[in-house]
Image: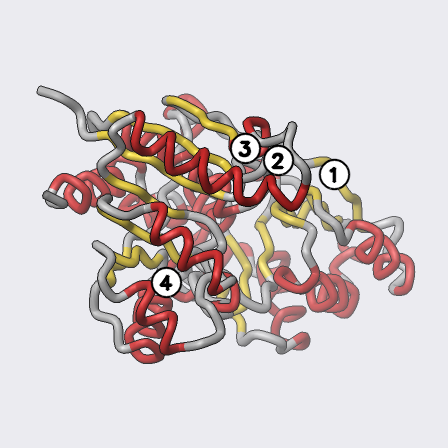
Amino acid sequence: MNKKKVAIISNSLGKGGAERFAALLTFMLEDSDFEVHSIIVNDVVDYSFTGNLFNLEKESSRYSFLFRKLKKGILLRRYLVQNNIEIVIDSRSRNVLFRELITRFIYRGLKINYIIHSYNFQNYFPASKFWSRIIYKNVEVLICVSKAIEQKVNQLYKLKNTVTIYNPFFIEKKELEKVLEPQNVILFFGRFDEKVKNFTLMLEAFSDSKIYLKDYKLHLMGSGNDVDFIQQKIGDLNLQDYVEILPFKQNPYNEVREAKFTLLTSHYEGFPMSVVESLALGTPVVAVDCNSGPGEIIQNEFNGLLVENYNKEALALAINRFADDDELYHFCKKNAAESVQHLSLKNISEQWKTLLINQK
């Protein structure tokens, strides 16, 4: 039987949650017996993937900047046609109306699936609600990574061709079975982007908690444009001896396991994979209840602590609770891994397979 041919189109396979998911999706679909093609707009590949890769930036690099955008569109359409692609999964950011109208023309004749990775719709919808409905209403499905995102799409755009499929974790069994003794370390891992991750809140709450007087340190692991801002903030709060910046790692499993707990303070999210992976590795999480994701993953005082967003005092208190209340901490730690088993690669792969196999 011929395999269905699927193209996953993303900005890149570089550092970031949406990019990491696009790479992970290649494995899910290949294991579900699809022929997988990854098409990236920008020439950045940090994550492992499987299947075929078509790099639009490399293929159009010999053209001038202005003509390159047009050439990428031509190359994309040619690749889709020549490889007999049947299904497109578009994982890009999509907020420029003219570009998205052209993209819909490029995708003509194909089954189109769009992923919405973030509660910040400025990244995924043009400003006009009217044109957003025009672009999205006749596609196969809008795949939302949280129920809160799906509800918002339904309310704002009156679109009903939506479904929620959560992001999975993909950690090999041998990694899940490793046991490391937690250290007096609080860990953040992810992109260094102040506008999303709100390091100001994180660092100020850490400072106010005074947990460093109990010999705790905060480790920030990742990369991004705001590392200088973060270092400046660390200096302003006189936390140089207590906060350490670590380089990005594709699979920071040992660091997560060795952390007492991980920390998330975002303005907004989609369905943060760092939270899911932390719990899968048996490490509880302290997170703000931002839109969206943490509230659909963390059960307060069961597998972590969920705190009102922008409440610095409540966040500082939660940080200290995991340091001081051994009974609560060990209860949350005991429940962490089991609480996300429904988000295993196998379970989420089945949902994707069911979704795509029914697109005739």
Q: Is residue 99 among the parts visible in the rendering?
A: yes
Tag 2: residue type? Glu
**Location of mark 4 (residue):** 296
How far apart are labels 4 and 3 at the CA level?
A: 23 Å
Q: Specify few, some or many for label 2: CA neighbours under 10 Å numbering under 14, 14-19, or 20 or more.
A: many
Task: Please tell me whether mark 2 or mark 4 is closer to you in this view.
Answer: 4
- Residue at numbered disc 2: 255
The residue sitting at 26% across, 25% down in the picture is 35
Give neighbour class at mark 4: few <14, some 14-19, many 20+ (Cα, 10 Å). some
Residue nearer the viewer, 193 or 68: 68
Mark 1, secondary structure of its residue: strand
Figure quadrant of the N terminus: top left
Tell me residue 211's x, y (percent). Answer: 74, 59
As measured in the structure, the alpha-carbon distance from the residue carrying label 3 to the one carrying label 2 is 5 Å
Residue at x 50% of width, y 63% of height? 95
Horizontally, residue 106 falls left or right of residue 199, namely left
